[in-house]
Amino acid sequence: MTRETFRVTLQPEGRSVFVLRGTTLVEAAGQAGVILNQPCGGDGACGKCRVEVLQDPPPPTAADREHLSPRELEDGWRLACRLAVASDLVVSIPQETRFFEQMILAEGEGCRYPFQPNLRKKLVTVGEPTVEDQRSDLDRLKAAIGEDGLEAGLSLIRALPGILRGGRPHVTAVLEGKEIQWVEAGDTTDRIWGVAFDIGTTSVVGALMDLGDGRTAAVASRTNPQVHFGDDVVSRISYIENTRDGLEKLRRRLLTCLNEIIIELCESAGAEPESIYEATAVGNTTMSHIFLGVDPSPIAHAPYVAVLRESVDVKAREVGLEINRNANLHVLPNIAGFVGSDTVAVILASGIARDDAVQLAIDIGTNGEVVMGNRLRLVACSCAAGPAFEGARIRYGMRATEGAISKVVINEGVEVGVIGGGRPTGICGSGLVDAVAELLDAGAIDETGRIAAPAQAPALSDELKAAIVEFEDQLAVVLVDGAQSKTGRPILLTQRDVREVQLAKAAMRAGIEVVAEEFGVAPTEVARVLLAGGFGNFIRRSHAKRIGLLPPIRSERIDFIGNAAATGAKTVLACGDCRAEAERISRETEYVELASRPGFQARFAEAITFPPPG
Amino acid sequence: MTRETFRVTLQPEGRSVFVLRGTTLVEAAGQAGVILNQPCGGDGACGKCRVEVLQDPPPPTAADREHLSPRELEDGWRLACRLAVASDLVVSIPQETRFFEQMILAEGEGCRYPFQPNLRKKLVTVGEPTVEDQRSDLDRLKAAIGEDGLEAGLSLIRALPGILRGGRPHVTAVLEGKEIQWVEAGDTTDRIWGVAFDIGTTSVVGALMDLGDGRTAAVASRTNPQVHFGDDVVSRISYIENTRDGLEKLRRRLLTCLNEIIIELCESAGAEPESIYEATAVGNTTMSHIFLGVDPSPIAHAPYVAVLRESVDVKAREVGLEINRNANLHVLPNIAGFVGSDTVAVILASGIARDDAVQLAIDIGTNGEVVMGNRLRLVACSCAAGPAFEGARIRYGMRATEGAISKVVINEGVEVGVIGGGRPTGICGSGLVDAVAELLDAGAIDETGRIAAPAQAPALSDELKAAIVEFEDQLAVVLVDGAQSKTGRPILLTQRDVREVQLAKAAMRAGIEVVAEEFGVAPTEVARVLLAGGFGNFIRRSHAKRIGLLPPIRSERIDFIGNAAATGAKTVLACGDCRAEAERISRETEYVELASRPGFQARFAEAITFPPPG
């Protein structure tokens, strides 16, 4: 049977997630990538996680009554940490309640990075030239701006006579440090936008930020159209190596996608692409190389090095981004061939590089990244987990979209939660982790990963025994029978699927252990474990530990930090000085190459088996 | 009759000039734009002006015997200041004898600017990446170069994997300060070129410099193809204002010309365009604007301001120069709408901005520039002389090319010298100055510029009386009769021609007086007067004074400094630090706008008449 789930829709994003009854709103928001601010740790003590329930708010809790006024309660305000979902909800999450927004925006506690964008606008009056004042257009403009050491590029100079002779007395200068980046006729000081991209192998996310106040005005994402040329970085590189102009073809595909996102963001926020004056981007090392038109081939061959580690600043028009013609593009630095600027962004956004306490950040994916460290030292590796957690190489696997089984609970029999709430068509990564963990606890899978034949497992419930079947010369567990699936065929977890999960989790876990060993602190002793990225936000902590994907860390010390890579890209947009910190992270993070490390294979083999129960 | 002239050919330029018997080789070289080094002032005392006469050297003088060894005398070496031309000569001018080359190259006396180009090459070995050394291509390259704070642009990064994997152990890095400008496979340290352009309204000159030793390896010039769109800057601007894409059309014409010059220079020197890593350019303000694609229209309308005064550094490929794809182009700064970077270059190359003594630099042309100053202060103006000195608006006027009367001497009758030595077809600027000066001295033209009717001029020789004729309702002087001209028609100097000369010389002279007044030093009191540019190198100093074009300054204080604008462009190529000095000159030179200056019209009217004899 499928368990009851509810749709929670977050505003202003308009993003929805489906959660089981009783899930807290903090958790639900986290699954949607919106991380809430809860200084007290989520026990209703601080009152900081205020949200507004837009329709039919649930009755207030005691904590709500303590922290909110009667008028606020009347208006639907509630504390997200105390709100257990029991119906479909539409909830507006204000800026000040968002962890990362607050981190960037506010002063004081919880504020890691000041809101200090590189760009500012200044309204000035440039005098007409006269016989007495024969200064050039550029000299008069500089004098009107009234700062020392100003510089201007050729592109602005070319546009200058037309702008200054447009008949308006005032012009608005866009300043980036000492560079006059652009000048516009009239007063446009209320329009100053920046765009941040997270370029993933599978998905591309763009966020439009108002550089006047740091507000994220719109978010849009698309599938990276390069997926037609291979679904992982190695197959993309292979395409480049074997195709005439392959690099340029992949680059143009991506560029088209980015420019479509820009248009969508602008339409959504009522902005003009010409008023976007800066772009930032993060991505894995291969995506960054392709985006910049740099051949990533060396990354695919031993010893797997990048052409480019450092950050790149280049005019956005040089790579083809259709924003202001003089806008700068800042691509964050990489760490190694398989640890890209997205990981630098995760480290930056999570703040682990500034804390004294040692923390562990984990981004689970086809190439999972693991970072352990504090402000003194950082160690990272890349784990070749393979695409099992994204549903690939799994008999009934699929991505975490509508129709995917994302939750599995075993009591007497198997119960599942489905994304979108309808009939399921397959199983996604978090469902897999759930299924394996619950089957382990039920005794239907043993420590070695073997599915128990019903005859040899007398302790199993009858319902579970009945669910274990022979399928294609192997054992398999029926998660949903044909009558309840959308396709009419049963959805099974096969023995080989379990093996794929073992390989994937062992790769991640061995990486965690090796990084911890290199750093010299046991994973169980770190102050916090931060799970980043889409998959990380959907798994259940206890189940990730049960299958051994995560070490046995107390669940309250495991935090979801959402799409921290995208947050990092926004952070450097909002805070120009953070780029130096990103550069330092890129330069100083020690990279551990797992394949060549003595002892890695042993750790990997050890991590294949499942931990004993409890 | 035509007077005897001889062809003097200078090597390695292969440039020829025609001079009258008795002209010194220093003067002849000066007419060809090659300025010789003569610390002693040209009286044979120092022995620095050594040249090698390649065929039939004239007998040695006493000064030659004193400064040169018997073996050198035997080989044809002579002192140029003592060599009076009495036959056709082919002469090789070594580097150390050239004033500007020596100025840039040598250390010690006479050396104004050190040879310190911005670019250098370094041969390095970039190690292969290994499992132990996983640094990126760029990081390994930087480590191999071994300097702090190195930077690299996207264009280099894109090319890097191909270069490093070319199979050769060594690569050559081209460094510009802290920027890794380019990298080449193998050892190319012996090839490092720069190109300097002087973009005139009429002519474009390019020089290819070996940035390894400062040697000028080739010089080439072409007519600016924009002349088809108007022969002065105002008509070019008018074309731009009245033609769709007019700016782009003019820019492309110029660019094609510059790229042809680059090919010619490379063929001549055995260089590759890809091995030219930097370009510098000077020109009048309108030419610089067009070259950079900046609309020069404001220059043509009151109050005649430029869009751009400052220098511009831009990738050469951005403006379309076909040299190394990552080469920098440095366009020198302007002073005002009608005083361009060519004048900055003249000031720089002449060294007047560094001397304590006050000097006067004059570049005579359609727009003549006048600069007075020393290291503390500089004052400049632009004089609208019009094209008379270039042969335009003169009945039989022509440019200073083969067939032009360039010298006029009047004894009993009129004698002329012709460029190329054949029959004349017209008269050029220096011939005009000669003719008017000689006719003034002979009494055939009076102080007001009126040509004397033979009946009212009893003191004239009979021969001269016979040369004064009625022509098209005015008086005119026959310089060459039809029997001796190439066309079969007589070549005359008409009354209106004399008026044109008066207007032109008055404009220049009034500019000189106003600049001197502004500066506060009489033109006759300056330490030196420096005549720059093609025309300046052909006129006779005494005659320029006789007609009042120049103030009555002792001739030994008037020096020809050749194409000082081109020399300035070469100077900043050879000496990167000189760019700051050029910027200072641009910023600090006071510009006097003549048209709006009270008293200018009175000075102009005063300068129309000719000075009294003696």
Image (spheres, coloured by chain):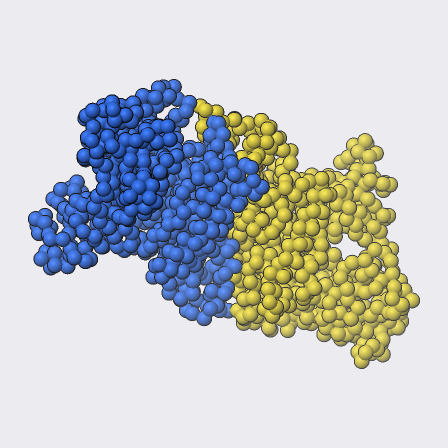
Chain colours: A yellow, B blue
Quarter residue A551 falls in: bottom right
**Is B348 placed above or below B215 here?**
above
Quarter residue A284 falls in: bottom right
The quadrant of the picture occupied by the C terminus of chain B is: top left
**Is B43 placed above or below B302 here?**
below
**Percent x, y for residue A365?**
67, 62
Question: Looking at the image, which residue is at 53% across and 52% down?
Answer: A312
**Is B560 placed above or below A238 here?**
above
**Percent x, y for residue B67?**
10, 50
Q: Nearer the viewer, residue A364 or A402?
A: A402
**Percent x, y for residue B493?**
31, 34
* A275 to the left or right of A590: right
Q: Residue furthest right?
A: A483
Q: Nearer the viewer, residue B600 or A322?
A: B600
Question: Looking at the image, which residue is at 49% across and 35% down?
Answer: B307
Q: Residue furthest bottom?
A: A473
| Residue B298 can be seen, yes or no | yes
| Residue B349 can be seen, yes or no | no
* B434 to the left or right of A211: left
**Percent x, y for residue A484?**
90, 64
Q: Nearer the viewer, residue B399 or B157?
A: B399
Question: Looking at the image, which residue is at 48% across and 25% down?
Answer: A130
Question: Looking at the image, which residue is at 73% across and 67% down?
Answer: A392
The quadrant of the picture occupied by the N terminus of chain B is: top left
The number of discs equals 0
